[in-house]
């Protein structure tokens, strides 16, 4: 019974986080290899406000799931610049 209760609490917490998360797509110039992908992933995973990071070398994009207000678009652009790349566009997906 305790196990079932714990599982249901974890599921509801996960669903709450998903409901209030926002998704951002960042077009990145200069990403050419697997090391570039790894560098961007490591950089974004260090931010506590980012809950999920997906980097695609094929599309030259970073997909981020973040908290509703943080990080700001400017913070994201600066992180891309700090990683050695150029942010071309940051788009928030509407749900």
Image: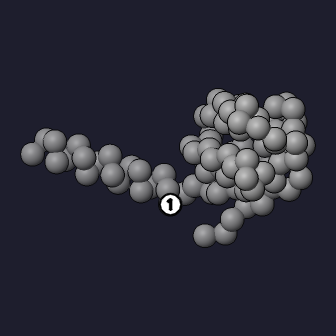
Residue at point 16%, 48% (across, down)? 4
Q: How many labels does the image show?
A: 1
Residue at point 81%, 53% (across, down)? 27
Q: Where is residue 37 in the image (x, y as percent from the top left)?
A: 71, 38
- Asked whether the viewer can see residue 63, the reply is yes
Relative to 17, say whether 78 is above or below: above
On screen, residue 95 versus residue 11, left or right, reads right
Relative to 5, say whether 84 is above or below: above
How was this image coloured? one colour
Give the labeled residue for mark 1. 19
Residue 74 picture quarter = top right
Quarter of the image with the C terminus is: bottom right
Residue 21 picture quarter = bottom right
Towards the viewer: 49 or 23: 23
Helix, strand or loop at label 1? It is: helix
Q: Where is residue 79 in the image (x, y as percent from the top left)?
A: 80, 36
On screen, residue 77 versus residue 21, left or right, reads right
Name the residue at the left extreme: 1
Residue at point 83%, 48% (across, down)? 28
Q: Where is residue 43 in the image (x, y as percent from the top left)?
A: 71, 31
**Crowding at mark 1 (Cα within 10 Å: few <14, some 14-19, many 20+):** few
- Asked whether the viewer can see residue 68, the reply is no
Quarter of the image with the N terminus is: top left
Relative to 37, say whether 67 is above or below: below
Residue at point 44%, 55% (across, down)? 16
Towards the viewer: 47 or 69: 47
Q: Where is residue 83 in the image (x, y as percent from the top left)?
A: 82, 31
Towards the viewer: 27 or 59: 59
């Amino acid at each position: 019974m305790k196990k079932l209760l714990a599982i249901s609490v974890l599921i509801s917490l996960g669903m709450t986080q998903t409901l209030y998360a926002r998704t951002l797509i960042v077009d990145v110039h200069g990403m050419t290899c697997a090391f570039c992908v790894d560098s961007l992933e490591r950089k974004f995973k260090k931010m506590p406000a980012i809950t999920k990071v997906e980097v695609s070398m094929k599309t030259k994009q970073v997909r981020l799931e973040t908290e509703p207000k943080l990080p700001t678009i400017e913070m994201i652009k600066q992180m891309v610049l700090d990683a050695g790349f150029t942010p071309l566009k940051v788009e928030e997906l509407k749900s």
